[in-house]
Amino acid sequence: AQSVTQLGSHVSVSEGALVLLRCNYSSSVPPYLFWYVQYPNQGLQLLLKYTSAATLVKGINGFEAEFKKSETSFHLTKPSAHMSDAAEYFCAVTPGGYSTLTFGKGTMLLVSP
Amino acid sequence: ETGVTQSPTHLIKTRGQQVTLRCSSQSGHNTVSWYQQALGQGPQFIFQYYREEENGRGNFPPRFSGLQFPNYSSELNVNALELDDSALYLCASSFRQGDTGELFFGEGSRLTVL
């Protein structure tokens, strides 16, 4: 079984500041990990994914995440926040293959001018 | 390449009614998954369809049912609607053959039950 914990339901940053959204996972097998973003009244868009290749994964819109097996973490970062980054972010885990994704509860990112 | 499309985008029903939501999978994808996203929550897995058969189900009662058609499109049916069924229903497609589990989502159907 797998699960995801996202620390902080809301994160507030100023424009230009570092963005850090935390995700810890639990999985009985080596996991595949994903970050999705959801803008208001829209579906989920894939930001990036970890599929057991490089542990530092780069995604769209300047986001990246690092897989740390020892810490069972997959935190999402962006060096400089932009107003357009304001959205809800979901971390998800799967053992892959024929299994489906298990999502965290999400973190709402608020960006102030 | 055509993405995942869902219809209708919004609908309002009353308690006890039945609803059907529709999903067209992305071109080349053979698997469809349905998720329920209640307000302020992450998506919760309802079920998955592969080759027209249900293949995996989350913790949802039998009044949630589905179909997958030969062209891989899918329907989600919910009978005897309850107030708590109000949510965004997301359809996601994927190509299921040793894949990494990545899902491609539609925009969702927002259901309001009064």
Image: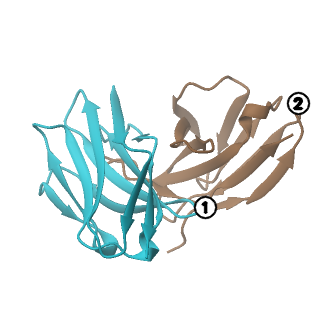
Chain colours: A cyan, B brown
* Mark carried by residue B107: 1
Residue A59 appears in the rendering:
yes
At label 2, the amino acid type is Gly
Decide if residue B62 is on the left or right side of residue B82.
left
Secondary structure, mark 1, is loop
Looking at marks 2 and 1 on the same chain, the residue that comes earlier in the sequence is marked by 2
Pointer 1: residues within 10 angstroms few (<14), some, or many (20+)? many
Among the 4 quarters of the image, the one containing residue B14: top right
Pointer 2: residues within 10 angstroms few (<14), some, or many (20+)? some
Depth order, front residue of A45/B104: A45
At label 1, the amino acid type is Glu
Secondary structure, mark 2, is loop
Which percent across, then down, holds residue A45?
46, 63
The answer to whether A73 is drawn above or below residue B23 in the figure is above
* Mark carried by residue B16: 2
Quadrant containing the C terminus of chain B is top right
